[in-house]
Image (tube, helix red, strand yellow):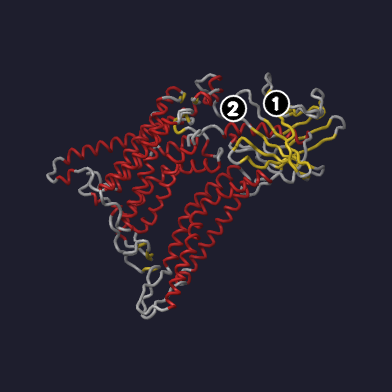
Amino acid sequence: MSNPNFDQTVCTPEEVASEGFSGFYCYTRRQNVGLVVVSLAGFLSLAAVVGMFGLILRNIIRAREFTDPRKRRLIKVPMDMFVLSLLTADLFQSLGVVMDVRWINDGVVRAGGLCTAQGVLQNIGQAGIAMTTFIITLQTFDAIWRRGGITSLRWASVLVGIIWAFLILTVAISASVHNNPAFYAPTPYWCWISSSYPNYRIALENFWLWIGFAVSVLYIPLLFCETERIRPGEPEWWIFKLHTRSSGNSERRSQLAIICALAYCLPVLPTSLARWFLVVHGDVKPFASAQAQFIIKGIFSLSGVCDVVAFQYARSGLLLFGSAAEEASVESEPVAAEGDDISVNDSDKSTGPPKFRTHGPLKKHWKFFVLWLVVNAFDAVWITYYVRAATDPNPRTAVNRSHGGWQAYYLIMYCFGFCLGFANIVVCMWYAQSARAPARTRGATRSTMIHYSWHGARILILLPVAVILGLGPFFSPFIGVKLGQEQAWLHRCDSYPVEIVLSGLSFNAPNTSLPTATFSIRQDGILQSQYQYSLTNDAVNTSIWRFGPAPGQSLPDGQIVTYNLTNSSVTATCAGNNTTECTQGSFDNSGFLSFVLTTLSNATNVNLKTVDGDWVYAKSDDAPSYMLREVKSDGSFGDVVVRTAVTEPGHCTLLKLCANGATVENLAPVGLTLMKQNEYARVCTIPNSN
């Protein structure tokens, strides 16, 4: 059982009620504990980075003893410049995190100069880490795979200068131009880019986190290269050969490649996923809860520690820590592997007119291709069920039977899709290389030219297929859900005579605002808005709620439905009479939503029950979702009375219901649903720090 003291704040009830307008957020004691953990992670990274800079300073002092001026230089190779930039970005981020100590001490995070300073430090630090890691990954990949990369210190300096100039200028200009509301504000647990500027969040930080994480998969072919499973072609670096076995002298190099990959992937993976899902779904999902945000931020705050560890073990020859920068193991030249090659690149070396190889790899590795097709077909089915469950969740299927299982389903699907997309690109490259056009010979004939034309057409066909296979597994669920939700919002209720749009209140809505339900009735195939109901809470007994015509509405046949949450009872007045009760009953909103309603005039009963359980969710982290049917005397289900459609895309406060009428049997479920939608609307509109 949770301790209620942990949910107390230092703020007064009036301050808590106005925190959405006043630029501050009051922590509960439970949230204070979470923020302490985040700050400790920031202090660890700060200590690691400051310690590393101290060792670098020691190296500079020691280097003065060398007579050779080249050995005295701190920056000898471009990677020195990139690593120094990465450590500087880690320092900025760590300083921003440890500033949470002020909010912990006050119990409140407030907009102002300190808040802006924290937002600037975190914005520059996190984006700088992502950008620099992006450059380091490409440099490492190019150096190992192609034996290339940036070799000029001048160009490396220009590149690093562009990164930091971009960060400083964009942050400074954005913060100075956007003052109302403030560009950096409580979000709500610490200060970052305000939720009023979602596009800036993506452009100034999230995009670079995502692209940095995506490019980090280049360490996968480097791992195979270092273990000598793959050999890049020479001089054609964009082709490769596969090997059946590797030599035993590459184990340490493979370990170092893994360290470099994990140093960035592990801290940034939770943050990248959290920000991606919050952008994709546009409402509250598992990553948006306070506990999840503290865990995610705590892990990301350890990036300084991870980068220092990776530097010590994988790039120990840089920044005067070794005798030469070439000792950085992950940039060493791969050793030729011993063993049989599975060549997917060799041209036909037979004499005479060149022969065009088209089916070699398919014949030789047909089992692999069959497996690849099966995996992609499985992923397509996986995505199809996801889109279907997200856009038409009722009645439930095995995919969304439980809310926790549904969330795990799509989280794993996105992670699997990311890996599958990368694998699909590799397979397409492999297949394209298997049919390279042969070299021109003196004996080239018309047949050879036809082969060349066919080869070009094949590449043109394969290129869009590769793009679809590479991006589809990860992005198609997002696109499918967006399109499906648009259609569901517009047409899910087409077969019902009544459509109802529930409008919950955002977390910072004025106290005078009321949640409403707008009823539209279909007449002669045309949907027309008719009237509006509102939900009010009793001023004396807060367990009593009333659902009736909104203020200013003149409805001769209007009815008022009253809910008592203490004893789960419901009553309704007669049509056009606000004092006489015509209907009484009870409801059960735990598990399966059900109603038992009795008409007092003729003592007839109506039993209603949802087809599936879990119509509302813990912590209100999703909108209500159900299909309510009439229960016949034999216990079987009858017609649908009310069902939810979807929330309006981009507006989590609006939920559409489909109803077969506007009688009290429909009004009673609608009012209770509006109550739960209002709770969800408040939660889904609270700014999140991801």
Q: Amino acid at mark 2?
A: Ala
Res 49 quadrant in image = top left
In the image shown, does 502 or 277 lie closer to the viewer? 502
The answer to whether 289 appears left or right of 579 in the picture is: left
- Residue occupying the far left of the picture: 67
Q: How many marks?
A: 2
Residue at figure coordinates x 51%, y 20% from the top left: 11
Q: Amino acid at mark 1?
A: Trp
**Horizontal and vertical percent position of residue 536:** 68, 25
The answer to whether 512 appears left or right of 345 in the picture is: right
The answer to whether 82 appears left or right of 14 in the picture is: left
In the image shown, does 521 or 378 lie closer to the viewer? 521
The residue that disc 1 covers is: 545
Residue at figure coordinates x 33%, y 58% from the top left: 145
**Horizontal and vertical percent position of residue 433:** 41, 66
Res 636 quadrant in image = top right
Q: Which mark is residue 509?
A: 2
